[in-house]
Amino acid sequence: MFRVATHSLLRTLFVSLGLLACAAVAQDQPDQKAADKPAKDTASAPQTQSAPDAVDPLKRPADEKQRKKNQKALKQELSKPYKKWLDEDVAYIITDEERAAFRQLSNDEERDNFIEAFWQRRDPTPDTEENEYKEEHYQRIAYANEHFAAGVPGWKTDRGRIYIVFGKADEIESHPSGGSYQRPMEEGGGETSTFPFEDWRYRYIDGIGQEVIIEFVDTCMCGEYHMTMDRSEKDALLMTPNAGLTLYEQMGMSNKASRFTGSGIERLGNGPETASQASKQFDRLEQFAKLQAAPKVKFTDLEEAVNSKVILNPMPFDVRTDFVKVTSDTVLVPVTIQMRNRDVTFVNKDGIQRGTVNIFARLTTLTGKIVQTFEDTVQVDVPAELLPRTAENASVYWKALPLRPGRYKLNIAVKDVNGDRKGVWSRSVVVPEFSDDKLATSTLIVADDMEPVPTKAIGTGMFVIGTMKVRPRVAPASGKPALFRKDKDQKLNFWMQVYNLGVDEKTHKPSATFEYNITNLATNKQVVQKTETTDTMGNLGDQVTLQKSIVAANLQPGTYKIEIKVNDNVSKQTIDPSAVFAVE
């Protein structure tokens, strides 16, 4: 009995003490708040306990544990398609800011909207249904997977990444088996043996520079080429004593061991151009870093120039458009842009005078809907001693656009990179319709260069139309005809296609005559007259390509008109396109 009573007494005592403590706390809290308030509030406010301030759970700062929990939830929430899009499809072209923003999205609807906006920002023709940038990007991924796979998918390799971001290189020097290699002087000279390697040369990459050379080396000889800053990495005899010596090492002017005692990023060894190469190591580091970044929008200043109506310090250039039938509803429109060298600013680059011009063009319908845009760089290299003699020569750029028949507006802007001049050209372009039942011809092109192209280059490359390279001579904007010099080495070339020749029902062949007449416009006398027929031209269909050449030296200085008259004996139709040119 005594023990039980003692326990009951203790329990009662503890409960009483707890109640007293709670009362004391409850009494102290309002007093503390009252002490914190101004005196006038204390006098007027009712003596009641205020509720604690509410805190927005979305604005409450998360502790480290909660932050890790949120990141884990984000990874779980990202379904496979979105994760693949972020980590594979656009891994190389999405910016850090865009990646961070995408990771903050909370649901699939927001992610879909983000992806749509992502491609729209990069669409060169936002007013059309097709997104050429997106289509080209996925084509590059497919190409990389097909050609650069090596134990891993092609898009994951260094060559695949560079191809996806920057496209096809202008030139590739490939050594797929390695073997004997004669070093250039900038690498020390001498002969060695190499691992398989490739040098990709880009004429120009926006934001990186001109003459960008990227080297890939397959040191494992397993097909997995990796990008390197150290050009000596391809040297298979680098670690072999007294083997694969440079020129100075062979002459006893240097020791191979010195390659490994320097502080540079390359182990090329001493050579005739060692000093100049050492100063370029920071350039190589900078280039390597820039190649890792997502590409930027090109030539935004020229896009503004296209939209502007006022151009200060204008740069002159000339433009020519031609029309070649592809199908009944598609016409190839080659656009030729010509600039005189004397209007381009040249700067010295390693002993070579180099001029660089950026080009931006936009093709729209009459209602302002963008059909196509293109941008590129024209670069001219001239030996310093020959620059004065080439000042009157011209540099030419060519771009072929497949279009539907109709009326368009073509706007072109050019910029002299080394100088401070811009030029703008704007004209209406009417693309003809080549109906299947009417005799028609392409544009009659007067060219300063015309030659067949190799089989592998048919239909691709600058100035290539079908199987021929045809470089037009562009007439100046002043209205004067295209000019050729009276030179034994200068040829005048004429190229034209004839469409929809009638086919005889009995012979299943066309029957037509082609008359070539060149007339001196000053004397109105024919200086060249020639006729040929389909009977002497071999197997032909309803389409014929005409191409003729004469030596400019055979013509006296003056202005001439070339006329090609086509007589279709089957359909009884006639057509006679012409062009004017001058010889001086």
Image: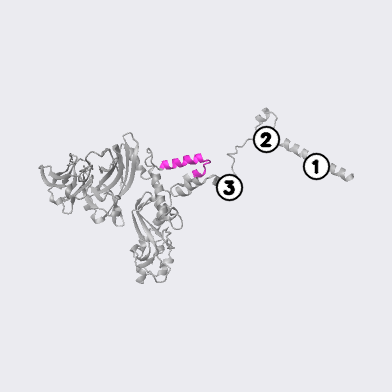
Q: Which is more N-terminal, label 1 or label 3?
A: 1
User: Rounded to the nearest whole Å, what is the CA distance between mark 1 and mark 2?
Assistant: 29 Å
Q: Which mark is residue 14?
A: 1
User: Which residue is labeled 3 in the image?
Assistant: 68
Q: Amino acid type of disc 3?
A: Lys
Find residue 339 and report its horizontal and vertical position in percent.
25, 46
Q: Report the magenta stretch's main SS.
A: helix
Q: Is residue 347 visible?
A: no
Indicate which label's residue lies in the foreground, 1 or 2: 1
Magenta extent: 100-121
User: Which residue is labeled 2 in the image?
Assistant: 33
Viewer-nearest residue: 43 or 248 = 248
Find residue 188 and report its horizontal and vertical position in percent.
36, 65
Q: Is residue 40 above or below residue 509?
A: above
Q: Is residue 222 visible?
A: yes
Task: Answer whether residue 118 is magenta in the image.
Answer: yes
Find residue 294 and report its horizontal and vertical position in percent.
43, 48
Q: Amino acid type of disc 1?
A: Phe
